[in-house]
Amino acid sequence: MCFGSKIVETQTRQELPEFIQKEAERITGLSRALTDQGRRYVPYGGERLAPLTTEQQLARQASIQQAGAFGPDLQRSRQFAMRGASPITAQEIQQFQSPFTQAVLQTTLDELDRRQQIADQRLADQAVRSGAFGGARFGVQQAESQRNLRDVQARTAADINQRAFQQALQQAQAQRQRESQAAGQFGNIAGQQMQLGSQGIQGLLQAGQLGQTQAQAGRDIAFEDFQRQQNFPFEQARFAAGILGGMPQPVTTFTQQPTAGTGQRLLGLGIAGIGAAGQAGGFGNLFGGFSDIRLKDNIKLVGKSPSNINIYTFNYKGSDDTYQGVMAQEVPWASSLHDNGYLMVDYSKTDVEFRRLA
């Protein structure tokens, strides 16, 4: 660096500036307080598990009700199926026989008797007219007539009873067929009801699952926020501990410095202090170097950072050394005003590295 015509070798003791010492004390106190606070366990007061939704509760009730809802229909189907597979009994046939069969049979037999009586009377009249009444011939004719009557009556009764039996059997068979059909119908009804019920339950479960998932997501987010809130002080403590660990320690150095130049006297600021801040690297990056545009000459824009911050090369007034960094006026979120009235930059709040080039 060139500050004048005379180079003076001096022994200096670099102490931490007062504002850095105060910051270190503040960070130490913060770390101690956070450590004490961390010893107290704070339980989470919110709900961790989302309850069953209304739809899920309805689906559960419907499942319980459905378990026994189809029993009667299935029981009827089984009964009808068993009856349809068994042989028809005489008792079942008798149930379908007409109660008027005997009345019809008796009426028919009575009519045959009446006709036989008329025929017998004619035969007797003929025998009287011929003088054969009471004779052997008349007796044979009369016996034959009675035998014919009984034969006709027997055939008639058999025919009437047979037709009645066939009608009753057909009706019993038709009943069995209807019962077999009913067995299938009741089974189909039970199956359809079960399918419809299952579809309804499945729809309720899907709708309920959607609501429960949404509710659970909200609870998970709340719990994560609680955990971040609880961990935040400890993250701050770790960050503060990192800051303390990166602080420079007081050192004694031998340096060669030029006499004060005109620019220094005008600024009323020790350039050696500015240069030390830049050369210290971590010191300048951690707590900010003097980057006020009013302290700089030969300012050139050489690029931009990933976050679009302008990067410059420059010289501090009164110095020939070249540095790279930012202009404090362009990064107000990372700048602070020093007691001397000039802006400093905390480079840890930017993505630009402050460094000496030559």
Image (tube, helix red, strand yellow):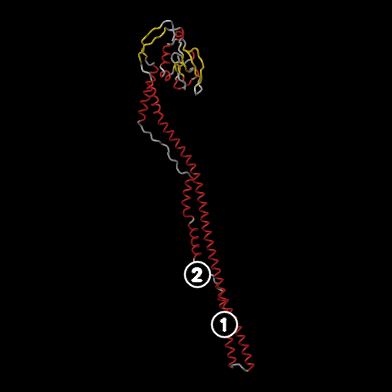
Crowd class of label 1 (few under 14; some 14 to 19; many from 20; radius 10 Å): few
Residue 326 higher or lower than 66, as above or below: above
Crowd class of label 2 (few under 14; some 14 to 19; many from 20; radius 10 Å): few
Q: Which residue lies furthest to the right in this view?
A: 129
Q: Which residue lies furthest to the bottom in this view?
A: 131
Identified at 35% across, 15% down, the residue is 251
SS at mark 2 in the image: loop
Identified by mark 2, the residue type is: Thr
Q: Do the residues labelled 2 and 1 touch (CB within 8 Å)?
A: no
Q: What residue is shown with label 1?
A: 151
> Quarter of the image holding residue 348?
top left
Mark 2 → mark 1, Cα distance in angstroms: 31 Å
Identified at 49% across, 22% down, the residue is 305
Q: Residue 197 carries which label?
A: none
SS at mark 1 in the image: helix
Identified by mark 1, the residue type is: Asp
The spot of residue 259 in percent (x, y) is: 42, 7
> Quarter of the image holding residue 103?
bottom right
From the image, which quarter does the C terminus lie in? top left
Q: What residue is shown with label 2?
A: 89
Identified at 43% across, 40% down, the residue is 49
- Residue 352 horizontal side relative to residue 30, left or right: right
The spot of residue 177 in percent (x, y) is: 54, 64
